[in-house]
């Protein structure tokens, strides 16, 4: 059992952070998550079996956090139960799905590693640092040969063809064997050094990515621009991992007594720091700085630093130089700030008066989180239900505050640990969390002055503190690999302290019957967990295979893969939704309707699912009233969707006698968010005319006609409303007549100064009439006034970015002004919208471009 226990923990610490596939699952973390949770379940079962089979019986660690853990689990259970019973039956399947998913994470990814690490022995020194350095360098060096020695694999290859590579398997086998040999005694120091080795390797890879050197994958991985993701898939996950490891590397440096050891740990610390800078995650920078500073509160580490001022000064100077001299990323695409510009950009945004997305998006998320908790202050919205209900609260704020209208986002979590628990578990859960961390730091303070507390124990405490600070703005604690290491470090800190200060650290299960029951239960739970995560992995691989096949036009193959994904389960909203889309494209509308409903049972917080159900029910299943309910829900979630406004208003207007008031509300919001949509203004004018609000009807019809002068229905409605109100024809009617005259002149080839003057008079009198402005800009271009033409055409494009003719003419104006780069960009945009646009084609040809 010791071998199985050690191997499982080696896999958790070494394989999970470093194993990464880019074309296997759409969620790139799934392989890491599945492997990590299977490894932790196996380690837990092996620990229980080893204890049962030993003479001393099964011993369970006792820590100061036992009570807080029970309190937190109880608060989560109570909050979810209250929420489940208090919500409509429609939401309950998705509440069960989301609640169980998050509870599995809490138990398997947080509780299990905490108690596993608390059970480990701190005795012994372990292999020397040189052995770990040699292992990391040698194993990393083997990967340099991977590009030349790997087996070529097509992006369309099957799952196992992508996973299996003889050279890669050989390197991984060698790494696992070496890591097991170094950790075979399964002590705290062994696994801490293994985590340091894995973190250093991941950091080196992240630094290579930052400088545009990719030697694993055919293309550079830059989903976040110049922000490195390494093998973590997200820069915020790598950064939190390094916040936990950096204090450990510094503590080892301080404790080292030889130059060689100091060089090893100093190099590791600088590599971790450099990779942290490459992530551009400012909350993690603050957390790392706080964590390293906290090391100074521990007497042994202070004495060690004072005893070696020269090495410590050199490391500090090197660290400061890295911060001050670190350049911007070499990746040319996307967002590539330097360290200094990353720190100052919020101030620049404030000076410009523009919204700063990293801050203002968090304000939106925090506002929703506050509202969730305030709805039921005692137990919150329900444990594990943040992602499910967030879109409904966001929709309300988007509809209420225009300042948020450009910041709509998907939020898994609250980006603040206090609001995270407030939103989901209310004061009950927040109290349990406060109890937990008060007990943690109070215990650490009591133990800090004892002689037997090593520097790595202090580093574990400091790392936990740093990550808690980091996650006041981050979400990384709720993702598998950084969350695992966080709770592992917390368990190390509490386990070591209890062992030294409280003697009776163990609860012993010595009764044979109870021990056997515990062993059977542990094995069954481990098998169940393994089967669950295997199903998750299979579901995700088939889902991504189907997702790719749809985009390749292979609809039958996509449906087969997506049906396999659903069969493997457990249900996941994106995978099931994609199957519904595939059925709809294959015109299997009844199947699509049922599958979309299954997607809502997995997570009922996606507006696009409601929209698609409504569309299928309306256009294919002929159920307009049922469609209306789903369109309404889509609107409540996403009041910024043009498609929702178009479809919902169209259905409501089919029966204005029943739905007139609702249609007015919808169209008033539609014209607020989409003031350039002439059809919305026309429909609003129609409803106001029905209510005999003639002045309002005239205003709406006039706006519609100014936006779309060719809309005959709006002109007829406008004239009818004016007649009923006893008023003369509004000025826009005359403007339309003048515009029609100008059109006729231009069709005759009359591009004279008189035509230009007529167009300019129209733009002066009706500045919102885009067609008049387009004609004025085009005529100015004909008369050689490129600068003036550019101003008019830019306004047309700003209001209608899909106007290919305006884009092409704007390209001509830019070219006439000598702005070649801008001209080429406009010509390309026009050709992308209209491949047959002769002006764009001629412009690109004149520039020698394709």
Image (cartoon, rainbow, N blue to C red):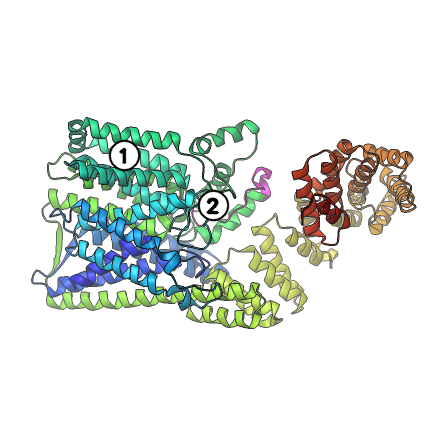
Q: Which image quarter holds the N terminus? A: bottom left
Q: Is residue 198 above or below residue 554?
A: above
Residue 502 occupies quadrant = top left
- Res. 224 mark: 2
Name the residue beneath numbered marker 1: 292
Q: Residues within 10 Å of mark 2 (few under 14, many from 20)?
A: some
- In x, y percent, where is residue 251? 21, 37
Residue at position x 20%, y 63% in the image: 4
Q: Is residue 614 above or below residue 798?
A: below
Residue at position x 11%, y 67% in the image: 512
- Res. 554 mark: none
Return the residue nearer the eye: 213 or 504: 213
Residue 81 is at least partly visible in this image: no
| SS state under label 1 | helix
Residue 595 is at least partly visible in this image: yes
Residue 540 occupies quadrant = bottom left
Return the residue nearer the eye: 644 or 496: 496
Return the residue nearer the eye: 343 or 815: 815
Residue at position x 63%, y 65% in the image: 616
Return the residue nearer the eye: 544 or 494: 544
- In x, y percent, where is residue 360? 51, 37
- In x, y percent, where is residue 765? 83, 33
Residue at position x 26%, y 51% in the image: 138
Residue 807 occupies quadrant = top right
Residue 50 belongs to the span the image colors magenta? no
> Over which residues does the magenta segment extend?
399-413
Report the number of discs: 2
| SS state under label 2 | loop
Q: Residues within 10 Å of mark 1 (few under 14, many from 20)?
A: many
Q: Earlier in the sequence, mark 2 or mark 1?
A: 2
């Amino acid at each position: 059992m010791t071998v199985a226990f050690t191997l499982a923990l080696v896999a958790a610490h070494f394989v999970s952070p470093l194993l990464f596939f880019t074309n296997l699952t759409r969620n790139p973390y799934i392989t890491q998550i599945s492997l990590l949770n299977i490894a932790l379940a196996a380690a837990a079962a092996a620990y229980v079996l080893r204890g049962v089979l030993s003479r001393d019986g099964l011993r369970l660690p006792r820590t100061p956090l036992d009570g807080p853990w029970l309190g937190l689990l109880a608060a989560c259970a109570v909050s979810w139960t209250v929420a489940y019973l208090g919500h409509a039956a429609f939401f309950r399947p998705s509440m069960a799905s989301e609640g169980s998913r998050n509870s599995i994470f809490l138990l398997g990814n947080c509780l299990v590693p905490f108690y596993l690490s608390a059970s480990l022995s701190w005795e012994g020194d372990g292999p020397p640092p040189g052995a770990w350095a040699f292992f990391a360098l040698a194993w990393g060096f083997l990967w340099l040969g991977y590009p030349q020695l790997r087996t070529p694999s097509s992006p369309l290859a099957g799952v196992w063809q992508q996973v299996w590579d003889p050279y890669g398997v050989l390197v991984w086998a060698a790494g696992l064997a070496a890591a097991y040999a170094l950790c075979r005694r399964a002590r705290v120091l062994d696994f801490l050094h293994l985590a340091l080795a894995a973190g250093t390797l991941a950091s080196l890879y992240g630094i290579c990515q930052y400088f545009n050197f990719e030697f694993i994958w055919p293309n550079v991985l830059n989903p976040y621009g110049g922000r490195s993701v390494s093998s973590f898939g997200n820069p915020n996950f790598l950064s939190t991992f390094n916040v936990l490891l950096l204090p450990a590397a510094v503590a080892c440096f301080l404790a080292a007594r030889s130059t060689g050891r100091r060089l090893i740990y100093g190099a590791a610390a600088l590599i971790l720091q450099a990779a942290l800078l490459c992530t551009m995650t400012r909350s993690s920078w603050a957390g790392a700085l706080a964590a390293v500073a906290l090391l100074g509160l521990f007497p042994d580490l202070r004495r060690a630093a004072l005893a070696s001022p020269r090495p410590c000064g050199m490391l500090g100077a090197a660290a400061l130089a890295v911060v001050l001299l670190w350049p911007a990323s070499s990746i040319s695409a996307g967002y590539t700030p330097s360290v200094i510009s990353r720190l100052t950009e919020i101030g620049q945004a404030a000076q410009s008066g523009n919204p700063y997305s990293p801050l203002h998006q968090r304000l939106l998320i925090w506002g929703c989180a506050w509202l969730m908790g305030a709805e039921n202050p005692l137990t919150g919205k329900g444990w594990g239900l943040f992602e499910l209900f967030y879109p409904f609260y966001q929709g309300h704020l988007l509809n209420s505050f225009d300042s948020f209208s450009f910041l709509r986002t998907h939020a898994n979590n609250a980006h603040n640990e206090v609001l995270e628990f407030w939103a989901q578990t209310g004061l009950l859960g927040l109290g349990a969390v406060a109890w937990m961390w008060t007990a943690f730091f109070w215990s650490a303070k009591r133990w800090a002055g004892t002689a037997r507390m090593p520097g790595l124990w202090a580093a574990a405490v400091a790392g936990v503190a740093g990550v808690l600070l980091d996650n006041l703005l981050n979400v990384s604690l709720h993702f598998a690999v950084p969350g695992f290491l966080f709770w592992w470090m917390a368990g190390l800190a509490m386990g070591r302290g209890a062992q030294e200060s409280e003697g009776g650290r163990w609860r012993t299960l010595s009764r044979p019957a109870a021990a056997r029951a515990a062993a059977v239960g542990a094995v069954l739970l481990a098998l169940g967990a393994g089967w669950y995560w295997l199903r998750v992995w299979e579901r995700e691989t088939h889902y991504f295979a189907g997702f790719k096949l749809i985009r390749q036009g292979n609809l039958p193959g996509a449906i087969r893969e997506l049906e396999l994904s659903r069969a493997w389960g457990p249900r996941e909203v994106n995978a099931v939704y994609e199957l519904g889309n595939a059925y709809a494209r294959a015109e299997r509308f009844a199947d699509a309707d049922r599958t979309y409903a299954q997607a809502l049972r997995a997570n009922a917080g996606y507006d696009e699912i409601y929209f698609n159900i409504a569309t299928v029910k309306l256009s294919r299943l002929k159920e307009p009233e049922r469609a209306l309910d789903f369109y309404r829900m889509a609107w409540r979630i996403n009041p910024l969707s043009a498609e929702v406004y178009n479809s919902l208003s169209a259905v409501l207007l089919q029966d204005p006698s029943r739905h007139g008031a609702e249609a007015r509300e919808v169209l008033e919001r539609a014209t607020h968010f989409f003031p350039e949509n002439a059809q919305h203004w026309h429909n609003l004018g129609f409803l106001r005319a029905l209510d005999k609000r003639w002045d309002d009807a005239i205003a709406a019809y006039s706006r519609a006609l100014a936006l779309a002068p060719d809309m005959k229905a709006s002109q007829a409605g406008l004239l009818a409303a004016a007649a009923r109100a006893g008023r003369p024809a509004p000025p826009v009617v005359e403007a339309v007549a003048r515009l029609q005259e100008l059109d006729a002149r231009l069709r005759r080839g009359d591009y004279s100064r008189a035509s230009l003057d007529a167009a300019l008079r129209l733009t002066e009198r009706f500045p919102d009439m885009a067609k008049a402005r387009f004609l004025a800009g085009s005529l100015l271009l004909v008369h050689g006034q490129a600068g003036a033409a550019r101003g008019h055409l830019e306004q047309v494009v700003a209001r209608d970015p899909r106007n290919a003719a305006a884009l092409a003419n704007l390209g001509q104006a830019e070219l006439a002004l000598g702005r070649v780069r801008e001209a080429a960009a406009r010509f390309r945009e026009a050709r992308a919208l209209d491949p047959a646009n002769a002006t764009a084609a001629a412009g690109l040809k004149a520039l020698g471009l394709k």
